[in-house]
Amino acid sequence: MSTIKDIQDQIIENFSFLPEWDERYAYLIELGQKQEPMPEAYRSEENIVRGCQSLVWLHRECRQGVIYLQSDSDSLIVRGLAALLLQIFSGQPAEEALEADLTFFEEIGLNQHLSSQRANGLLAMVEQIKAFAAQCADEKA
Amino acid sequence: MTLDINKIRSDFPILQSTVHGKPLVYLDNAATTQKPQSVIDTIRDYYTGYNSNIHRGTHHLSNLATEAHEAARRTVQHYINAEHDHEIIFTRGTTEAVNLVAFSFGEAFVNPGDDVIVTELEHHSNFVPWQMMCERRGANFKVIPFDENGDLRLDVYEDYLSDKTRIVAFNHVSNALGTVNPAREIIRMAHDIGAAVLVDAAQSVQHIDHDVQALDADFYAFSGHKIYGPTGIGVLYGKEKWLNAMPPYQGGGEMIDQVSLEKTTYNKLPFKFEAGTPNIVGPIGLAAAIDYLNDLDFNEIVTHEDDALAYGRMRLLEIDGLKIYGNAKHRTSILAFNIDGIHHYDLGTLLDTKGVAVRTGHHCTQPIMTALGIDGTVRASLALYNTREDIDALVTSIHQVLKILGR
Protein backbone atom coordinates (compact mmCIF):
# COMPACT_ATOMS: atom_id res chain seq x y z
CA MET A 1 0.00 0.00 0.00
CA SER A 2 1.34 3.40 -1.00
CA THR A 3 1.60 6.10 1.60
CA ILE A 4 -0.91 8.92 1.69
CA LYS A 5 1.76 11.31 0.48
CA ASP A 6 2.60 9.09 -2.52
CA ILE A 7 -1.08 8.83 -3.45
CA GLN A 8 -1.56 12.58 -3.22
CA ASP A 9 1.53 13.14 -5.40
CA GLN A 10 0.15 10.67 -7.94
CA ILE A 11 -3.22 12.48 -8.04
CA ILE A 12 -1.50 15.82 -8.49
CA GLU A 13 0.57 14.37 -11.34
CA ASN A 14 -2.51 12.88 -13.04
CA PHE A 15 -4.27 16.21 -12.93
CA SER A 16 -1.19 18.06 -14.21
CA PHE A 17 -1.80 16.41 -17.59
CA LEU A 18 -5.23 18.03 -17.69
CA PRO A 19 -4.83 21.80 -17.96
CA GLU A 20 -8.43 22.53 -19.03
CA TRP A 21 -11.30 22.66 -16.57
CA ASP A 22 -13.44 20.56 -18.92
CA GLU A 23 -10.84 17.80 -18.86
CA ARG A 24 -10.41 17.92 -15.10
CA TYR A 25 -14.11 17.59 -14.45
CA ALA A 26 -14.56 14.94 -17.15
CA TYR A 27 -11.75 12.94 -15.48
CA LEU A 28 -13.28 13.45 -12.05
CA ILE A 29 -16.69 12.29 -13.25
CA GLU A 30 -15.06 9.26 -14.87
CA LEU A 31 -13.31 8.42 -11.58
CA GLY A 32 -16.66 8.47 -9.85
CA GLN A 33 -18.26 6.31 -12.50
CA LYS A 34 -15.45 3.73 -12.43
CA GLN A 35 -15.81 3.36 -8.69
CA GLU A 36 -17.29 0.08 -7.52
CA PRO A 37 -21.01 0.63 -7.03
CA MET A 38 -22.00 0.95 -3.42
CA PRO A 39 -24.15 -1.92 -2.12
CA GLU A 40 -27.73 -0.77 -1.65
CA ALA A 41 -27.60 -1.72 2.04
CA TYR A 42 -24.89 0.88 2.63
CA ARG A 43 -27.11 3.68 1.32
CA SER A 44 -28.60 3.95 4.76
CA GLU A 45 -29.74 6.94 6.77
CA GLU A 46 -26.81 6.55 9.19
CA ASN A 47 -24.30 6.64 6.34
CA ILE A 48 -25.57 9.94 4.98
CA VAL A 49 -23.23 12.90 5.12
CA ARG A 50 -25.52 15.82 4.51
CA GLY A 51 -24.33 18.75 2.41
CA CYS A 52 -26.43 21.78 1.77
CA GLN A 53 -26.93 20.81 -1.88
CA SER A 54 -25.85 17.23 -2.41
CA LEU A 55 -25.89 13.98 -0.49
CA VAL A 56 -22.93 11.74 0.21
CA TRP A 57 -23.13 8.23 1.61
CA LEU A 58 -20.04 7.06 3.47
CA HIS A 59 -19.67 3.48 4.66
CA ARG A 60 -16.89 2.90 7.20
CA GLU A 61 -15.17 -0.24 8.39
CA CYS A 62 -12.24 -0.72 10.76
CA ARG A 63 -10.24 -3.96 10.63
CA GLN A 64 -7.04 -4.39 12.67
CA GLY A 65 -6.44 -0.68 12.83
CA VAL A 66 -6.94 -0.13 9.10
CA ILE A 67 -9.88 1.87 7.72
CA TYR A 68 -11.90 0.75 4.72
CA LEU A 69 -14.35 3.12 3.07
CA GLN A 70 -17.00 3.14 0.38
CA SER A 71 -18.99 6.11 -0.84
CA ASP A 72 -21.55 7.39 -3.27
CA SER A 73 -23.30 10.68 -4.02
CA ASP A 74 -26.29 11.99 -5.94
CA SER A 75 -23.93 14.46 -7.67
CA LEU A 76 -21.46 13.09 -10.22
CA ILE A 77 -18.84 15.69 -9.33
CA VAL A 78 -19.12 15.01 -5.62
CA ARG A 79 -18.96 11.26 -6.31
CA GLY A 80 -15.69 11.87 -8.19
CA LEU A 81 -14.27 14.01 -5.41
CA ALA A 82 -15.28 11.37 -2.88
CA ALA A 83 -13.53 8.75 -5.05
CA LEU A 84 -10.32 10.75 -4.67
CA LEU A 85 -10.76 10.78 -0.91
CA LEU A 86 -11.26 7.02 -0.95
CA GLN A 87 -8.10 6.50 -3.02
CA ILE A 88 -6.26 8.35 -0.29
CA PHE A 89 -7.86 7.01 2.86
CA SER A 90 -9.30 3.57 2.21
CA GLY A 91 -6.90 0.82 3.21
CA GLN A 92 -4.69 3.15 5.25
CA PRO A 93 -3.67 2.54 8.87
CA ALA A 94 -5.91 4.68 11.06
CA GLU A 95 -2.93 6.54 12.54
CA GLU A 96 -1.76 7.54 9.07
CA ALA A 97 -5.26 8.70 8.09
CA LEU A 98 -5.45 10.83 11.24
CA GLU A 99 -2.21 12.60 10.39
CA ALA A 100 -3.05 13.16 6.71
CA ASP A 101 -2.78 16.71 5.45
CA LEU A 102 -4.96 17.06 2.35
CA THR A 103 -2.86 19.38 0.24
CA PHE A 104 -3.87 17.94 -3.11
CA PHE A 105 -7.25 19.67 -3.42
CA GLU A 106 -5.54 23.01 -3.60
CA GLU A 107 -2.82 21.73 -5.93
CA ILE A 108 -5.33 20.44 -8.47
CA GLY A 109 -7.43 23.61 -8.26
CA LEU A 110 -10.48 21.99 -6.69
CA ASN A 111 -10.15 23.55 -3.27
CA GLN A 112 -13.41 25.47 -3.75
CA HIS A 113 -15.29 22.20 -3.29
CA LEU A 114 -13.81 21.75 0.17
CA SER A 115 -14.22 25.35 1.25
CA SER A 116 -17.51 26.24 -0.43
CA GLN A 117 -19.76 26.72 2.57
CA ARG A 118 -20.26 22.98 3.16
CA ALA A 119 -22.44 23.02 0.03
CA ASN A 120 -21.52 19.54 -1.08
CA GLY A 121 -20.85 17.67 2.15
CA LEU A 122 -17.24 16.99 1.20
CA LEU A 123 -15.72 18.84 4.11
CA ALA A 124 -18.09 17.01 6.44
CA MET A 125 -16.96 13.77 4.80
CA VAL A 126 -13.29 14.52 5.55
CA GLU A 127 -14.21 15.36 9.14
CA GLN A 128 -16.13 12.11 9.51
CA ILE A 129 -13.29 10.06 8.02
CA LYS A 130 -10.87 11.65 10.51
CA ALA A 131 -13.23 11.05 13.41
CA PHE A 132 -13.64 7.43 12.33
CA ALA A 133 -9.86 7.03 12.01
CA ALA A 134 -9.46 8.27 15.58
CA GLN A 135 -12.03 5.77 16.77
CA CYS A 136 -10.37 2.95 14.81
CA ALA A 137 -6.93 3.83 16.17
CA ASP A 138 -8.34 3.71 19.71
CA GLU A 139 -9.88 0.27 19.12
CA LYS A 140 -6.50 -1.09 18.05
CA ALA A 141 -4.79 0.40 21.09
CA MET B 1 -36.26 55.82 -26.43
CA THR B 2 -35.02 52.49 -25.19
CA LEU B 3 -32.31 51.71 -22.67
CA ASP B 4 -28.74 52.05 -23.88
CA ILE B 5 -27.66 48.63 -22.63
CA ASN B 6 -24.08 48.96 -23.84
CA LYS B 7 -23.73 52.16 -21.84
CA ILE B 8 -25.35 50.52 -18.81
CA ARG B 9 -23.04 47.51 -19.03
CA SER B 10 -20.04 49.78 -19.20
CA ASP B 11 -21.20 51.47 -15.98
CA PHE B 12 -20.68 48.19 -14.05
CA PRO B 13 -16.92 47.52 -13.96
CA ILE B 14 -17.21 43.90 -12.84
CA LEU B 15 -19.14 43.01 -15.99
CA GLN B 16 -15.95 43.61 -17.99
CA SER B 17 -14.07 40.93 -16.01
CA THR B 18 -13.28 37.33 -16.88
CA VAL B 19 -13.77 34.15 -14.81
CA HIS B 20 -11.62 31.07 -15.54
CA GLY B 21 -10.45 32.91 -18.64
CA LYS B 22 -14.01 33.39 -19.97
CA PRO B 23 -16.01 36.62 -20.07
CA LEU B 24 -18.21 36.80 -16.97
CA VAL B 25 -21.89 36.06 -17.61
CA TYR B 26 -23.47 37.14 -14.35
CA LEU B 27 -26.88 35.55 -13.79
CA ASP B 28 -27.03 35.43 -9.99
CA ASN B 29 -28.75 38.77 -9.45
CA ALA B 30 -31.42 37.48 -7.09
CA ALA B 31 -28.56 36.63 -4.71
CA THR B 32 -26.89 39.99 -5.16
CA THR B 33 -26.56 42.56 -7.92
CA GLN B 34 -23.39 44.18 -9.20
CA LYS B 35 -22.63 47.83 -8.45
CA PRO B 36 -22.28 50.70 -10.92
CA GLN B 37 -19.12 52.82 -10.78
CA SER B 38 -21.14 55.71 -9.30
CA VAL B 39 -21.97 53.63 -6.20
CA ILE B 40 -18.36 52.52 -5.82
CA ASP B 41 -17.17 56.13 -6.19
CA THR B 42 -19.72 57.41 -3.68
CA ILE B 43 -18.52 54.93 -1.05
CA ARG B 44 -14.88 55.78 -1.72
CA ASP B 45 -15.65 59.52 -1.55
CA TYR B 46 -17.31 59.06 1.83
CA TYR B 47 -14.25 57.37 3.33
CA THR B 48 -11.72 59.65 1.68
CA GLY B 49 -13.66 62.88 2.16
CA TYR B 50 -16.02 63.04 5.13
CA ASN B 51 -16.08 59.85 7.23
CA SER B 52 -17.41 60.77 10.65
CA ASN B 53 -19.98 59.70 13.22
CA ILE B 54 -23.39 61.25 12.74
CA HIS B 55 -26.27 62.94 14.60
CA ARG B 56 -24.09 64.19 17.45
CA GLY B 57 -21.06 65.95 16.07
CA THR B 58 -20.31 69.59 16.48
CA HIS B 59 -17.66 69.43 13.82
CA HIS B 60 -17.70 69.95 10.07
CA LEU B 61 -17.18 66.35 8.93
CA SER B 62 -19.91 65.07 11.22
CA ASN B 63 -22.31 67.59 9.76
CA LEU B 64 -21.43 66.54 6.21
CA ALA B 65 -21.87 62.86 7.04
CA THR B 66 -25.17 63.50 8.86
CA GLU B 67 -26.50 65.52 5.93
CA ALA B 68 -25.56 62.81 3.41
CA HIS B 69 -27.02 60.05 5.59
CA GLU B 70 -30.33 61.90 6.07
CA ALA B 71 -30.46 62.95 2.40
CA ALA B 72 -30.20 59.24 1.60
CA ARG B 73 -33.26 58.60 3.77
CA ARG B 74 -35.20 61.09 1.64
CA THR B 75 -33.92 59.47 -1.57
CA VAL B 76 -35.31 56.14 -0.36
CA GLN B 77 -38.53 57.82 0.75
CA HIS B 78 -39.10 59.27 -2.71
CA TYR B 79 -38.14 56.07 -4.53
CA ILE B 80 -40.82 54.06 -2.72
CA ASN B 81 -43.15 57.06 -2.40
CA ALA B 82 -43.44 57.00 1.40
CA GLU B 83 -45.40 59.86 2.93
CA HIS B 84 -42.74 60.80 5.51
CA ASP B 85 -38.97 60.39 5.71
CA HIS B 86 -39.23 59.25 9.33
CA GLU B 87 -41.14 56.18 8.08
CA ILE B 88 -37.84 54.93 6.59
CA ILE B 89 -35.84 52.82 9.07
CA PHE B 90 -32.37 51.68 8.06
CA THR B 91 -31.60 48.05 8.88
CA ARG B 92 -28.90 45.57 7.94
CA GLY B 93 -31.11 44.08 5.25
CA THR B 94 -34.52 42.59 4.54
CA THR B 95 -33.97 39.87 7.13
CA GLU B 96 -33.38 42.33 9.95
CA ALA B 97 -36.32 44.45 8.81
CA VAL B 98 -38.67 41.45 9.00
CA ASN B 99 -37.27 40.42 12.37
CA LEU B 100 -37.79 43.94 13.68
CA VAL B 101 -41.48 43.93 12.72
CA ALA B 102 -42.02 40.34 13.86
CA PHE B 103 -40.62 41.29 17.27
CA SER B 104 -41.95 44.78 17.85
CA PHE B 105 -45.35 44.34 16.19
CA GLY B 106 -45.69 40.99 17.96
CA GLU B 107 -44.97 42.52 21.35
CA ALA B 108 -47.56 45.25 20.80
CA PHE B 109 -50.37 43.55 18.93
CA VAL B 110 -50.17 39.74 18.89
CA ASN B 111 -51.71 37.75 21.73
CA PRO B 112 -52.36 34.06 22.43
CA GLY B 113 -54.94 32.65 20.01
CA ASP B 114 -54.34 35.32 17.36
CA ASP B 115 -53.44 34.36 13.78
CA VAL B 116 -50.40 35.30 11.72
CA ILE B 117 -50.51 34.46 8.01
CA VAL B 118 -47.53 33.91 5.70
CA THR B 119 -47.20 32.00 2.42
CA GLU B 120 -45.51 28.82 1.28
CA LEU B 121 -43.66 30.92 -1.33
CA GLU B 122 -41.57 32.77 1.25
CA HIS B 123 -37.82 32.95 1.62
CA HIS B 124 -36.84 31.60 5.05
CA SER B 125 -36.23 35.24 6.04
CA ASN B 126 -39.92 36.03 5.81
CA PHE B 127 -41.01 32.72 7.31
CA VAL B 128 -38.86 31.80 10.30
CA PRO B 129 -39.14 35.19 12.13
CA TRP B 130 -42.96 34.84 12.10
CA GLN B 131 -42.78 31.22 13.21
CA MET B 132 -40.56 32.32 16.10
CA MET B 133 -42.90 35.18 16.99
CA CYS B 134 -45.93 32.87 16.97
CA GLU B 135 -44.17 30.51 19.38
CA ARG B 136 -43.24 33.39 21.64
CA ARG B 137 -46.69 34.99 21.61
CA GLY B 138 -48.76 31.78 21.53
CA ALA B 139 -50.26 32.71 18.17
CA ASN B 140 -51.31 30.45 15.28
CA PHE B 141 -49.02 30.30 12.26
CA LYS B 142 -50.97 29.88 9.01
CA VAL B 143 -49.36 29.26 5.63
CA ILE B 144 -51.07 29.98 2.30
CA PRO B 145 -50.12 27.22 -0.18
CA PHE B 146 -49.33 27.74 -3.86
CA ASP B 147 -50.77 25.86 -6.83
CA GLU B 148 -48.99 23.81 -9.52
CA ASN B 149 -48.15 26.98 -11.47
CA GLY B 150 -46.61 28.77 -8.51
CA ASP B 151 -49.57 31.08 -7.90
CA LEU B 152 -50.81 31.60 -4.36
CA ARG B 153 -54.12 29.95 -3.44
CA LEU B 154 -56.07 33.12 -2.70
CA ASP B 155 -59.17 31.01 -1.96
CA VAL B 156 -57.30 29.44 0.98
CA TYR B 157 -56.08 32.88 2.03
CA GLU B 158 -59.66 34.14 2.08
CA ASP B 159 -60.64 31.21 4.33
CA TYR B 160 -57.75 31.96 6.70
CA LEU B 161 -58.65 35.63 7.17
CA SER B 162 -60.75 36.34 10.24
CA ASP B 163 -61.08 38.82 13.09
CA LYS B 164 -58.23 36.87 14.75
CA THR B 165 -55.77 37.76 11.95
CA ARG B 166 -53.25 40.32 13.18
CA ILE B 167 -50.71 40.46 10.37
CA VAL B 168 -50.12 38.99 6.91
CA ALA B 169 -46.57 38.74 5.52
CA PHE B 170 -45.76 37.84 1.91
CA ASN B 171 -43.16 38.47 -0.75
CA HIS B 172 -44.14 40.60 -3.72
CA VAL B 173 -41.88 38.39 -5.88
CA SER B 174 -40.78 34.84 -5.07
CA ASN B 175 -37.00 34.47 -5.12
CA ALA B 176 -37.29 30.80 -6.08
CA LEU B 177 -39.96 30.88 -8.80
CA GLY B 178 -40.25 34.51 -9.86
CA THR B 179 -43.99 34.61 -9.18
CA VAL B 180 -45.30 38.18 -8.93
CA ASN B 181 -47.94 37.98 -6.22
CA PRO B 182 -51.10 40.11 -6.51
CA ALA B 183 -49.94 42.48 -3.80
CA ARG B 184 -52.76 45.02 -3.96
CA GLU B 185 -55.42 42.31 -3.72
CA ILE B 186 -53.67 40.52 -0.84
CA ILE B 187 -53.29 43.80 1.05
CA ARG B 188 -56.86 44.94 0.40
CA MET B 189 -58.25 41.62 1.65
CA ALA B 190 -56.19 41.90 4.86
CA HIS B 191 -57.23 45.50 5.42
CA ASP B 192 -60.90 44.58 4.96
CA ILE B 193 -60.69 42.58 8.18
CA GLY B 194 -58.38 45.05 9.94
CA ALA B 195 -55.08 43.14 9.71
CA ALA B 196 -51.72 44.75 8.96
CA VAL B 197 -49.52 43.63 6.06
CA LEU B 198 -45.76 43.33 5.56
CA VAL B 199 -44.45 43.12 2.00
CA ASP B 200 -41.05 41.48 1.50
CA ALA B 201 -39.86 43.50 -1.48
CA ALA B 202 -36.31 42.06 -1.66
CA GLN B 203 -36.95 40.66 -5.15
CA SER B 204 -39.44 43.26 -6.38
CA VAL B 205 -38.26 46.76 -5.49
CA GLN B 206 -35.65 46.70 -8.30
CA HIS B 207 -37.87 45.02 -10.91
CA ILE B 208 -41.52 46.07 -10.65
CA ASP B 209 -43.81 48.68 -9.06
CA HIS B 210 -42.57 49.87 -5.67
CA ASP B 211 -45.00 52.59 -4.58
CA VAL B 212 -45.85 51.83 -0.94
CA GLN B 213 -48.80 54.24 -0.88
CA ALA B 214 -50.32 52.81 -4.07
CA LEU B 215 -49.85 49.31 -2.61
CA ASP B 216 -51.13 50.56 0.74
CA ALA B 217 -48.49 48.40 2.48
CA ASP B 218 -48.21 48.80 6.25
CA PHE B 219 -44.62 47.54 6.21
CA TYR B 220 -42.28 47.15 3.25
CA ALA B 221 -38.78 45.70 3.46
CA PHE B 222 -35.89 45.41 1.03
CA SER B 223 -32.09 45.03 0.83
CA GLY B 224 -29.65 47.53 -0.64
CA HIS B 225 -27.37 44.96 -2.23
CA LYS B 226 -30.13 43.54 -4.43
CA ILE B 227 -30.85 46.97 -5.93
CA TYR B 228 -27.29 47.75 -7.09
CA GLY B 229 -26.28 49.20 -3.71
CA PRO B 230 -23.85 48.00 -1.03
CA THR B 231 -24.29 45.02 1.30
CA GLY B 232 -25.16 45.46 4.96
CA ILE B 233 -27.86 48.06 4.40
CA GLY B 234 -31.59 47.45 4.17
CA VAL B 235 -34.77 49.41 4.50
CA LEU B 236 -37.88 48.99 6.56
CA TYR B 237 -40.73 51.26 5.62
CA GLY B 238 -43.56 51.36 8.14
CA LYS B 239 -46.64 53.52 8.36
CA GLU B 240 -46.14 56.13 11.05
CA LYS B 241 -49.21 55.00 13.00
CA TRP B 242 -47.80 51.47 13.40
CA LEU B 243 -44.21 52.47 14.10
CA ASN B 244 -45.30 54.91 16.80
CA ALA B 245 -47.39 52.21 18.48
CA MET B 246 -44.61 49.60 18.49
CA PRO B 247 -41.90 49.24 21.18
CA PRO B 248 -38.21 49.50 20.16
CA TYR B 249 -36.49 46.40 18.80
CA GLN B 250 -33.07 46.97 20.34
CA GLY B 251 -31.79 49.28 23.07
CA GLY B 252 -28.64 51.38 23.06
CA GLY B 253 -27.32 54.65 21.73
CA GLU B 254 -29.22 56.75 19.17
CA MET B 255 -32.60 55.25 20.10
CA ILE B 256 -32.90 57.00 23.49
CA ASP B 257 -34.35 60.31 24.58
CA GLN B 258 -33.52 60.39 28.32
CA VAL B 259 -31.84 57.67 30.37
CA SER B 260 -31.93 57.56 34.16
CA LEU B 261 -31.56 54.83 36.77
CA GLU B 262 -35.34 54.54 36.96
CA LYS B 263 -36.48 54.81 33.37
CA THR B 264 -35.48 55.36 29.76
CA THR B 265 -37.59 57.30 27.31
CA TYR B 266 -37.18 56.72 23.60
CA ASN B 267 -36.17 58.91 20.72
CA LYS B 268 -38.69 59.82 18.02
CA LEU B 269 -39.00 58.07 14.66
CA PRO B 270 -36.98 56.86 12.86
CA PHE B 271 -34.23 56.81 15.51
CA LYS B 272 -36.32 54.80 17.99
CA PHE B 273 -35.63 51.78 15.78
CA GLU B 274 -31.99 52.55 14.96
CA ALA B 275 -30.01 51.61 18.08
CA GLY B 276 -26.27 52.13 18.05
CA THR B 277 -24.01 53.86 15.56
CA PRO B 278 -25.67 52.99 12.28
CA ASN B 279 -24.16 51.81 9.03
CA ILE B 280 -23.35 55.37 8.00
CA VAL B 281 -22.04 54.83 4.49
CA GLY B 282 -24.59 52.13 3.60
CA PRO B 283 -27.54 54.46 3.01
CA ILE B 284 -25.28 56.90 1.16
CA GLY B 285 -24.23 54.10 -1.21
CA LEU B 286 -27.82 52.90 -1.52
CA ALA B 287 -28.95 56.41 -2.43
CA ALA B 288 -26.30 56.49 -5.17
CA ALA B 289 -27.75 53.25 -6.54
CA ILE B 290 -31.27 54.69 -6.48
CA ASP B 291 -30.00 57.87 -8.17
CA TYR B 292 -28.54 55.62 -10.86
CA LEU B 293 -31.95 54.00 -11.43
CA ASN B 294 -33.70 57.37 -11.31
CA ASP B 295 -31.57 58.51 -14.24
CA LEU B 296 -33.10 55.70 -16.30
CA ASP B 297 -36.73 55.21 -17.29
CA PHE B 298 -38.09 52.53 -14.96
CA ASN B 299 -40.74 51.39 -17.45
CA GLU B 300 -37.98 50.71 -19.95
CA ILE B 301 -36.13 48.63 -17.36
CA VAL B 302 -39.27 46.55 -16.85
CA THR B 303 -39.75 46.09 -20.61
CA HIS B 304 -36.10 45.15 -21.08
CA GLU B 305 -36.06 42.63 -18.21
CA ASP B 306 -39.35 41.08 -19.34
CA ASP B 307 -37.94 40.63 -22.82
CA ALA B 308 -34.81 38.88 -21.47
CA LEU B 309 -36.99 36.67 -19.26
CA ALA B 310 -39.32 35.63 -22.09
CA TYR B 311 -36.36 35.00 -24.37
CA GLY B 312 -34.68 32.98 -21.62
CA ARG B 313 -37.72 30.74 -21.13
CA MET B 314 -37.99 30.16 -24.86
CA ARG B 315 -34.30 29.30 -25.30
CA LEU B 316 -34.08 27.09 -22.21
CA LEU B 317 -37.14 25.08 -23.21
CA GLU B 318 -35.34 24.14 -26.45
CA ILE B 319 -33.01 21.98 -24.31
CA ASP B 320 -33.98 18.30 -24.13
CA GLY B 321 -35.23 17.22 -20.72
CA LEU B 322 -35.18 20.73 -19.26
CA LYS B 323 -38.00 21.63 -16.93
CA ILE B 324 -38.76 25.17 -15.79
CA TYR B 325 -40.24 25.67 -12.33
CA GLY B 326 -42.73 28.49 -11.93
CA ASN B 327 -45.45 29.17 -14.49
CA ALA B 328 -47.36 31.80 -12.55
CA LYS B 329 -49.65 34.26 -14.30
CA HIS B 330 -47.25 37.15 -13.64
CA ARG B 331 -43.52 36.55 -13.42
CA THR B 332 -40.29 38.48 -13.30
CA SER B 333 -36.52 38.03 -13.47
CA ILE B 334 -36.18 34.38 -12.36
CA LEU B 335 -35.43 31.29 -14.48
CA ALA B 336 -35.48 28.21 -12.24
CA PHE B 337 -34.91 24.83 -13.86
CA ASN B 338 -33.50 21.32 -13.76
CA ILE B 339 -32.42 18.95 -16.50
CA ASP B 340 -33.57 15.34 -16.32
CA GLY B 341 -31.09 13.10 -14.53
CA ILE B 342 -28.58 15.87 -13.85
CA HIS B 343 -27.81 17.15 -10.39
CA HIS B 344 -28.12 20.92 -10.02
CA TYR B 345 -24.78 21.08 -8.22
CA ASP B 346 -23.02 19.44 -11.19
CA LEU B 347 -24.69 21.78 -13.67
CA GLY B 348 -23.89 24.89 -11.62
CA THR B 349 -20.28 23.84 -10.97
CA LEU B 350 -19.61 23.16 -14.62
CA LEU B 351 -21.35 26.35 -15.79
CA ASP B 352 -18.93 28.23 -13.54
CA THR B 353 -16.00 26.85 -15.55
CA LYS B 354 -17.60 28.56 -18.59
CA GLY B 355 -17.72 31.90 -16.75
CA VAL B 356 -21.49 31.61 -16.17
CA ALA B 357 -22.56 32.48 -12.61
CA VAL B 358 -25.85 30.91 -11.50
CA ARG B 359 -27.09 29.70 -8.15
CA THR B 360 -28.00 26.13 -7.31
CA GLY B 361 -29.72 24.50 -4.35
CA HIS B 362 -32.86 25.24 -2.41
CA HIS B 363 -32.45 29.05 -2.43
CA CYS B 364 -33.45 29.32 1.24
CA THR B 365 -36.95 28.18 0.34
CA GLN B 366 -37.14 24.63 1.62
CA PRO B 367 -40.97 24.67 1.92
CA ILE B 368 -41.18 25.43 -1.83
CA MET B 369 -38.75 22.64 -2.72
CA THR B 370 -40.67 20.21 -0.51
CA ALA B 371 -43.95 21.18 -2.19
CA LEU B 372 -42.37 20.65 -5.62
CA GLY B 373 -40.85 17.32 -4.51
CA ILE B 374 -37.29 18.33 -5.43
CA ASP B 375 -34.18 19.15 -3.43
CA GLY B 376 -33.07 22.11 -5.51
CA THR B 377 -32.92 23.89 -8.85
CA VAL B 378 -30.51 25.81 -11.01
CA ARG B 379 -31.54 29.45 -10.90
CA ALA B 380 -30.54 32.10 -13.42
CA SER B 381 -31.75 35.50 -12.24
CA LEU B 382 -31.74 38.68 -14.29
CA ALA B 383 -30.97 42.33 -13.68
CA LEU B 384 -31.21 45.42 -15.82
CA TYR B 385 -27.80 44.87 -17.43
CA ASN B 386 -28.53 41.34 -18.66
CA THR B 387 -29.14 40.82 -22.36
CA ARG B 388 -30.31 38.19 -24.83
CA GLU B 389 -26.58 37.56 -25.42
CA ASP B 390 -26.24 36.50 -21.77
CA ILE B 391 -29.09 34.03 -22.29
CA ASP B 392 -27.42 32.73 -25.46
CA ALA B 393 -24.18 32.28 -23.51
CA LEU B 394 -26.06 30.37 -20.81
CA VAL B 395 -27.72 28.05 -23.33
CA THR B 396 -24.48 27.45 -25.28
CA SER B 397 -22.67 26.71 -22.01
CA ILE B 398 -25.38 24.28 -20.91
CA HIS B 399 -24.91 22.34 -24.17
CA GLN B 400 -21.13 22.22 -23.59
CA VAL B 401 -21.62 21.12 -20.00
CA LEU B 402 -24.01 18.36 -21.03
CA LYS B 403 -21.24 16.92 -23.20
CA ILE B 404 -18.86 16.80 -20.20
CA LEU B 405 -21.60 15.00 -18.30
CA GLY B 406 -21.75 12.44 -21.09
CA ARG B 407 -25.03 13.62 -22.65
Image (spheres, helix red, strand yellow):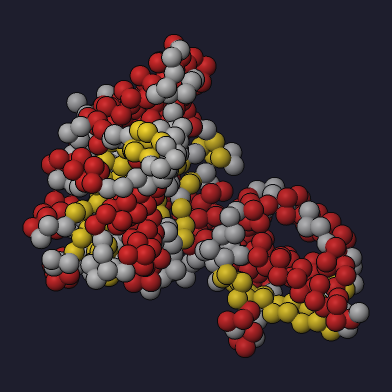
Residue pictured at 24% horizontal, 71% vertical: B113
Q: Is residue A34 above or below residue B400?
A: below
Residue B42 can be seen, yes or no: no
Q: Is residue B68 visible?
A: yes
Going by the picture, which residue comes out furthest to the bottom? A41
Viewer-side residue, A3 vs B176: B176
> Whole-percent x and y of residue B285?
40, 28
Disc count in the image? 0
Name which quarter of the figure residue B377 lies in.
bottom left
Tell whether B199 sits left or right of B123: left
Q: Could you tell me which quadrant the N terminus of chain B lies in?
A: top left
Question: What residue is shown at x 56% (from left), y 48% (from top)?
Answer: B353
The residue under the point 48% across, 20% down is B52
Q: Position of residue B318 (x, y in %)?
A: 34, 58
Q: Name the residue furthest top.
A: B60
Q: Nearer the viewer, residue B178 or B250?
A: B250
Quarter of the image holding residue B308?
Answer: top left
Residue B24, above or below B340: above
The quarter of the displayed image where residue A135 is located: bottom right
User: Percent position (x, y) of residue A28?
Assistant: 66, 62
- Would residue B333 be found to the left or right of residue B154 on screen? right
The residue at 75%/49% (across/down) is: A107
Residue B100's x, y, as percent?
Answer: 35, 49
* Up/down of A70 relative to B269, above or below: below
In the displayed orientation, state which residue is furthest to the left. Answer: B192
